[in-house]
Amino acid sequence: MKLVVGLGNPGPRYSANRHNIGAMAVDRVARRLGLGPFRSKFQGRIAEGSLEGQRALLLLPETYMNLSGQSVAEAVRFHKIALADVVVLHDDLDLAPGKVKIKQGGGHGGHNGLRNIDAHLGPEYWRIRLGVGHPGHKDKVSDYVLSDFAKAEQVWLDPLLDAVADTLALVLQGRASDAMSKIAATLTPPRPHPPKPAEPAQAPRRAAPLAPGASSPPDTGLAAALARALDSKNQKGTG
């Protein structure tokens, strides 16, 4: 079984916060792929289903963010899930808004949810890092991540959540690089090649200038026709 965890704080007050983008993504997975309904278990809400033939458990911890490890560890131990089969989706201040990185293991980067999971289970699980950008100064970080996404950010947020949902099965198959490539292609489609400029119309060819004293070259076809007409008229006049 695979365990897919979306980090966030519980309750409607926090549901649209930048800090909750991981929970938003897992909720989008459930809705887009028809998994669920969610029910209460493991100090959170869970939904089960199949992702392209792989049995998966979706988990939204309902502890606060800094206690996320309690919920995740309970699910891992109950189902005896290896850490290599755990995928955690979370917000990342070090990535530009809308950027996605997928990796196994590593540090928590100051993220309190990851810090608590590491404390309970160790760091060797997979992370889907969802960029939300940085407010510019560390003193602004708390207010920034606990604020809702701005309306202008919906331009990239909604397509990002869909792209993550559509590529999650690749991550569970161990094809993280393929998933990242597909997400990048979905969010930034290649620019169409500009049409080739039309070739300029060729100007009619001008006759070469005549040398002084030279007569124009006859139009042989017209000259022959005139000659035949005059000859016929002369013949009629002398008959």
Image (spheres, rainbow, N blue to C red):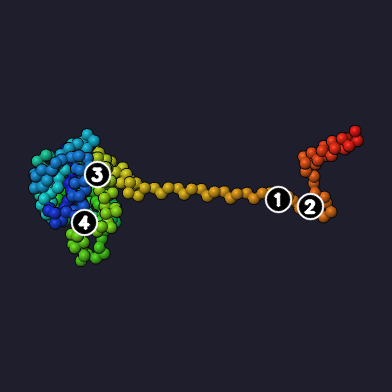
- Earlier-in-chain disc, 3 versus 4: 4
Q: Residue at x 14, y 50 (%)?
A: 117
Residue identifier under label 4: 18
- Earlier-in-chain disc, 3 versus 2: 3
Asked whether residue 107 is in view, the answer is no
Q: Are marks 4 and 1 in contact (CB under 8 Å)?
A: no
What residue type is disc 4 on? Arg
Q: Are marks 3 and 4 in contact (CB under 8 Å)?
A: no
- Hey, which residue is sitting farthest right in the picture? 238
Looking at the rendered image, the disc whose residue lies closer to the viewer, 4 or 1, is 1
What residue type is disc 3 on? Ala
- Alpha-carbon span between mark 2 and mark 1: 12 Å
Residue identifier under label 3: 165
Position of residue 225 measured from the top left corner of the image (x, y, whole percent) = 79, 38
Q: Residue at x 82, y 50 (%)?
A: 215
Q: Are marks 3 and 2 in contact (CB under 8 Å)?
A: no
Looking at the rendered image, the disc whose residue lies closer to the viewer, 3 or 1, is 1
* Other residues around mark 1 within 10 Å, as few (<14) / some (14–19) / many (≥20): few
Q: Are marks 2 and 1 in contact (CB under 8 Å)?
A: no
What residue type is disc 1 on? Arg
Q: Residue 219 occupies which quadrant of the picture?
A: top right
Q: Nearer the viewer, residue 67 or 209?
A: 209
- Earlier-in-chain disc, 4 versus 1: 4
- Alpha-carbon span between mark 4 and mark 1: 71 Å
Q: Residue at x 19, y 55 (%)?
A: 16
Position of residue 236 measured from the top left corner of the image (x, y, whole percent) = 87, 35
Label annotation for residue 206: 1
Q: What quarter of the picture does the C terminus occupy?
A: top right
* Other residues around mark 2 within 10 Å, as few (<14) / some (14–19) / many (≥20): few
Residue identifier under label 2: 210
